[in-house]
Amino acid sequence: MAIYKTPVAEFRFLLDEVLDYTNNIASLKEFADYDLETIVTMIAESGKFCANELLPINAPNDAEGLKYDPVAKTVTTPKGLKECYKKFRDQGLVGIIQPTEFGGGGAPHLFGALLGELQVSTNTAFSMLPGLSQGAMNALVTYGSDELKKTYMPNLVSGEWSGTMCLTEPQCGTDLGLCSTKAEACGDHWKLTGTKIWISFGEHDCTSNIVHLVLARLPDAPEGIKGISLFLVPKFLPSGERNGVFCGGLEHKMGIHASPTCVINFEGAEGWLVGTPHKGMQAMFVMMNAARLEVGIQGLGMSEVAYQNALSFAKERRQSRSLDRKKQDPNAPADVILVHPDVRRMLLNVRASTEGMRALAYWTGLQIDLSHHHPDEAARADAADMVALFTPIVKSYLTERGFENVSEALQVLGGSGYTRDWGLEQMLRDTRISMIYEGTNHIQALDLVGRKLPVDNGRMARSFGAKVQAFIEENASNEAMKEFIAPLTKTAEMLGEMSMELVMKAMSDPEEAGARASNYLNLFALTAIAWLWARMAKASLGKDDAFHKTKLKTARYFFSNVLPETRTLVAFLKAGKTNMMAFDADEF
Amino acid sequence: MAIYKTPVAEFRFLLDEVLDYTNNIASLKEFADYDLETIVTMIAESGKFCANELLPINAPNDAEGLKYDPVAKTVTTPKGLKECYKKFRDQGLVGIIQPTEFGGGGAPHLFGALLGELQVSTNTAFSMLPGLSQGAMNALVTYGSDELKKTYMPNLVSGEWSGTMCLTEPQCGTDLGLCSTKAEACGDHWKLTGTKIWISFGEHDCTSNIVHLVLARLPDAPEGIKGISLFLVPKFLPSGERNGVFCGGLEHKMGIHASPTCVINFEGAEGWLVGTPHKGMQAMFVMMNAARLEVGIQGLGMSEVAYQNALSFAKERRQSRSLDRKKQDPNAPADVILVHPDVRRMLLNVRASTEGMRALAYWTGLQIDLSHHHPDEAARADAADMVALFTPIVKSYLTERGFENVSEALQVLGGSGYTRDWGLEQMLRDTRISMIYEGTNHIQALDLVGRKLPVDNGRMARSFGAKVQAFIEENASNEAMKEFIAPLTKTAEMLGEMSMELVMKAMSDPEEAGARASNYLNLFALTAIAWLWARMAKASLGKDDAFHKTKLKTARYFFSNVLPETRTLVAFLKAGKTNMMAFDADEF
């Protein structure tokens, strides 16, 4: 069975020494109850819960899978999942970051991100149930009427009910403008008709009600994306009556076998408008952006648990002799494989990128809290810019690298990685979807390049660049930081150059933006992670304990053996669209 | 259901215009019956068979899986598999490249490689059954006594019986020196006792007998790798009696669910020595090297079929509008996704690398035939060098890139790629093992760096370098070839430089070789593929038909959007071992 140990020391280091939690969050009056020690204790406790309750059911749930009853149109989830969800709910974890006025814990968003990592590492399929409820609650809190909030929030916050996001239809996934689900007037509310597909936890038996948030068109809706509205459609109406929304079947997927991916049919189902008519995409993005960060954290959590399991194997498995005679174990016929350089290479590729991704995810999580609660308006606005800028980056880069990391960790185990015994093969199957759902990774890249960069002539990217530049200047005369500042400076320059070239080219030819976006996003991500690794190195310099000494070594590995991926990305960016657009359709 | 169309035009182009099949193979008297047209016809016919018979059972077999009966110790394969194997066998395809004296077809090895690709593209799990028989036959032909050949070859060649390779034990996979299966004298032959694991098609119901080739130790064997002998152990003895070799169970794997991966127990099973006592590794490598090339071709075949399916999806699926107004379809609410630059980027990444890998695999296949049959001794020796040099490269690079390619093709399909409907998720699960079995990819890299490079002070690499250099010089004044020759020259120089540095560093510190080997192998592979792409470009220049015009465009895409991966590899190689060996074991 897979193992998992909560990386509490990593969390504490990031919060306290890198992200300066106390000055940034705990000083905000909203979070007075959540000082550093409280948060670290909560992480440690939640981590124990996840390791003791969620992890043991991860593999059995994958094997047991889901049962769909086509007559009753119900979905039976694996036995362990239901029980665990109940325990998770009873601990108050579903609504921990939701407002206290609805019974939530009022904890910082940053804690939500930490809790998300723990859930993903121990049971990704499970994590989607409370995860989707977060999105629904966020949309309701931001755009719902007081009446809707009063009716639905308390039970969502407590976890008695769960939420879904119903966006995709057979003819529209990426392109939501093609959405054809219809809403017709029905007194003070609406009746919805249409079919949604790929609805995670669209039907299940873990909660007594399911609250669907659904994109559909009002009768007078303009065509395309500007005619989409958001509706709340409960499985059971406030009267207790069964509403006309039914599960038409389940998808058969590569992984996350305990997470039902449903066809959901709306058969004149009663629904209530959330927010303004035809402005549904706005409200949808509130759900979506939270979900995108959660999905990014899937890549992170999967990398972490894959690393831990590969490491544990590498410390036990004996094959062949160390290439360095001094390291050979005279008491055994072979050495543990951790002595072999390539095994270290694979493990450190995973580890150095994982720790960098964690820093990026939590720095972004911090920006969410600052954007809502910082007393200074300009600081709130800048934090909101950073959230907007980094949401697509976190979603795309962390899931892409996460998948590569799980595959690399699996490779450490050789044949054992391909069989069920160690859990790695399930991790690889489970994590592959994260590059696709909540907007494919290229959609994230288009969001970065097409929606975020252009705002106010590059305001967001300039603000980020200024932060990096300030750090470089601050440390310019610090001899001990030179080995980190030099490559960071070079990378930041390359990003600046590539940003300029992209903007120039794309102005006259939007296809250039499309052709470059994915590689550009990765270059941006690596630059941000290099900046955070340099900050982590600085926080570790001159400290003589094992944790900080190892952190410094990992920082060096990142700069020498991960960051140079930028070189290839720059070459691809310089190539631009020419050779990929030269083909006629029939030449493919 | 997945689709597949045999790439006959690709095969013909490579054989005729790039590899000069007629001068190289068809002129050898052994292959007089196999002129270019015969071979192309055989490919087309075999391709039809694979597409019509193997492909339709691929997904159902994955779903049906295998049944193990713990009492009878038998394995039941999916229904379709057995029927298909019978048809495949009846066409004479099992022994098509085996010597005519045992009833084989006497076809060139190159044809075996082509046939391998077709099988993998349509049904990887199936391909392993005849594939493993090839390895067993190769070992028997090279090292078996006349008596053993007479008894076993005809039924193996006809496919009435199948073969296996029994190497791995619970305590030894990579490190076969730890092998503990014992052989004790029993008249003129031996009795074997021990347990082997991960034995592909170790037990099944497709053939009337199974011929195991087994590594074990004679009573007087020295310790380690120098005390291993190879034995032939049939499931049924020549007398018809059941031998003491039984299947103890099946592994549960991520993919290739129709290929039984068995625990095989030898319980005093009667066996016959193949080759010289204690020299089993030599004979094992005859099987293994053939198997390594076959596995490399798995990466190629999977890339090809994944590309075809992703392309078919991209030509049908409509989402969003082309970024270029001129390309927008006025008759539909959205454009086919093939118009989007990033979809092209993903497709062309797969395609340009796949066509390059195919050229490398078949060039290597050609060298096998030349090494056996060229009339000139020096040419035979050089071809044998090329086979030795490129076997680990083909195995490792093609499987690593193959896995990336299937994942990239899956991404083109978005959510549909993650569900069972289009077959991509099965391809990803099926192909992941290829990076592990027949020696993990890093073992291939160590073979390249530790066993192949040092021979005669780098004779093999020098000979390859001379071929590349000759091509560069030949085309130095060809203006039209400049765009290919310039980057090829630069890449070849980088490889030369990195080879020199690796050899110098590794002389004083073998860990440097281990730390660099995997990245070095990839740099070597990309250089060889760049050379072959330049040759393919040359064969296409000035030809005005659609095939050659597209080939030239793909060549350009390879040089601008695939080859620059070398830049990052060079940076990693320059980093060497320092930062990966800096960690103490307890710092991981």
Image: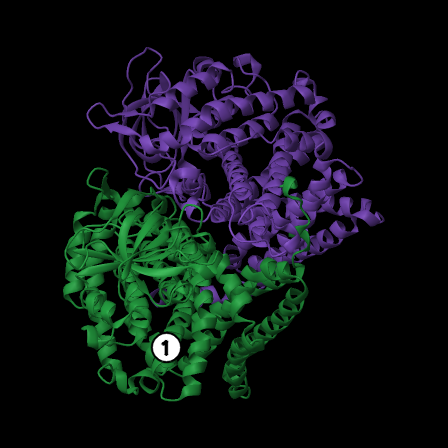
Chain colours: A purple, B green
Please tell me which residue lies in front, B570 or B193.
B193
Residue B259 visible in the picture: no
Up/down of A310 relative to B27, above or below: above
Please tell me which residue lies in front, B113 or A511.
B113
Q: State the image quarter where residue A426 is shown.
A: top left
Q: Is residue A116 left or right of residue B423?
A: right
Mark 1: secondary structure: helix
Up/down of A419 relative to A491, above or below: above
Chain of the residue displaying label 1: B
Three-letter code, disc 1: Leu
Q: Quadrant of the C terminus of chain B?
A: top right
Residue B259 percent across, percent down from the top left: 28, 50
Q: Which residue is mark 1?
A: B366
Query: Total number of numbered labels?
Result: 1
Residue A319 percent across, percent down from the top left: 51, 50
Up/down of A339 relative to B282, above or below: above
Which residue occupies the extreme front position in the image? Answer: B187
- What residue appears at the point 62 percent right and 49 percent down from the top-left corner? A526
Residue A552 visible in the picture: yes
Residue A157 percent across, percent down from the top left: 48, 17
Residue A326 percent across, percent down from the top left: 66, 52
